């Protein structure tokens, strides 16, 4: 992998932060030597009732299978393909719904922010702030998220080389906040297609704990003309490969009726599909821990 000439202090050449871990919430740590973390929930808040029902369902699965779980949902999908696509309830109503999820279930909650002004407001409600892939180079947004002191999950842009994700991490850490994770969600491969390079997981783990976003990696951006398509039949293949490659967490969008989801219907997992995925990757993680370690 050629990166051209660079100095010996290039972020990609730093020693791996071998045993670095990040605390995402009380009792939820991610990184070397820690259990696999699952970040799961619907793509977008469809209603307060639906998001709470999904959170309770996923909490039940987590309790049954012994998962470390963070619940996720977005209050605004600001990067939908079409102006006519459903974006969500908006910040005020959405954060109120997430606050109720957190209160009623006890789950840690993650949501994404799109503008610097949103970071402090969302950070007062949720446990983890997420920077969307399309915005991963936006300095002001990264600094605002870091300044909240909340853990920040930065998604790797579909246009970014994995070693260059050291720079967004450095921007967050420059605020004094070292609680940063990175998420792989596929790389653009021609038009309307994404591929996953498993080397990126190993490269980015030199920088911060790494999460694999299985459902967004299945997307065919703009593949339906006015909406994003997807190839959900490959979810298990990619998730198994990522865990075998040593990722620290799995991110998956889950819906109780994916065919009628208001966003990302082609790639969201059903409850049963999520349970199957979890069961398989936990077995692979156990084998990884026994043979490779952290």
Image: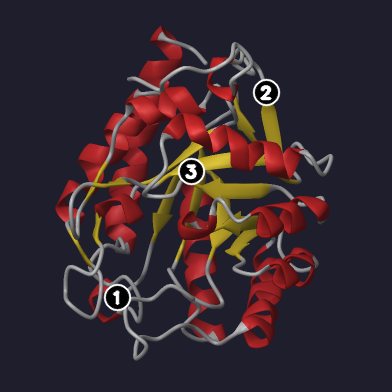
Query: Residue extending furthest front?
Result: 5
- Other residues around mark 3 within 10 Å, as few (<14) / some (14–19) / many (≥20): many
- For marks 1 and 2, the one nearer the N-term is 2
Label 2 packing within 10 angstroms: few (<14), some (14-19), many (20+): some
Nearest the eye: 25 or 230: 230
Q: Which residue is mark 1?
A: 257
The residue that label 3 is drawn on is 183
> What residue did someone put label 2 on?
20
- In front here: 150 or 286? 150
Upstream in the sequence, badge 3 or badge 1? 3
Q: Is residue 227 left or right of residue 275?
A: left
As helix, strand or loop, the secondary structure at mark 1 comes to: loop
Question: Contact (CB < 8 A) between labels 2 and 3?
Answer: no
Where residue 247 appears, x then y in whole percent? 45, 30
Note whether 90 is above or below 185 in the view shown.
below
The residue at 29%/58% (across/down) is: 272
Q: How far separated are the C-alphas under marks 2 and 3?
A: 16 Å
The percent coordinates of residue 96 (x first, y second) are 69, 81
Quarter residue 244 falls in = top left
Query: In the image as oriented, which residue stretches furthest toward the bottom?
Result: 84
Q: Earlier in the sequence, mark 2 or mark 3?
A: 2
Residue 39 visible within the image = yes
Quote the CA–CA distance across marks 3 and 1: 25 Å
The residue under the point 54% across, 62% down is 72
Q: Secondary structure at mark 2?
A: loop
Q: Position of residue 171 (x, y in %)?
A: 70, 42
Viewer-side residue, 9 vs 27:
9
Left or right for 223, reference 249: left
């Amino acid at each position: 992998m050629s990166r051209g000439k660079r100095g010996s202090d290039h972020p990609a050449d730093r020693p791996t932060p071998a045993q670095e871990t990040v605390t995402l919430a009380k009792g939820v740590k991610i990184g070397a030597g820690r259990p696999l973390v699952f970040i799961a929930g619907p793509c977008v808040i469809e209603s307060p009732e639906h998001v709470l029902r999904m959170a309770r369902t996923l909490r039940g699965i987590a309790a049954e299978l012994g998962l470390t779980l963070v619940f996720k949902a977005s209050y605004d999908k600001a990067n939908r393909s079409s102006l006519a696509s459903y974006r969500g309830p908006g910040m005020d109503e959405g954060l109120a719904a997430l606050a109720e999820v957190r209160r009623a279930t006890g789950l840690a909650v993650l949501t994404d922010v799109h503008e610097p002004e949103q970071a402090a407001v969302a950070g007062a409600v949720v446990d983890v702030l997420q920077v969307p892939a399309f915005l991963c180079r936006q300095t002001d947004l990264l600094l605002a998220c870091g300044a909240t002191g909340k853990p920040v999950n930065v998604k790797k842009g579909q246009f970014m080389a994995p070693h260059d994700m050291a720079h967004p991490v450095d921007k967050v850490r420059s605020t004094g906040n070292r609680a940063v994770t990175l998420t792989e969600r596929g790389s653009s491969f021609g038009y309307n297609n994404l591929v996953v390079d498993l080397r990126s997981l190993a490269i980015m783990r030199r920088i911060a704990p790494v999460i694999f976003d299985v459902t967004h990696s299945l997307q065919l951006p703009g593949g339906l003309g006015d909406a994003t398509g997807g190839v959900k039949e490959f979810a298990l293949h990619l998730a198994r490969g990522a865990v075998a490659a040593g990722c620290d967490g799995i991110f998956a969008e889950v819906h109780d009726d994916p065919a009628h989801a208001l966003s990302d219907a082609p790639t969201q997992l059903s409850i049963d599909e999520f349970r199957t995925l979890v069961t398989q990757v936990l077995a692979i993680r156990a084998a990884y821990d026994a043979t490779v370690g952290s």
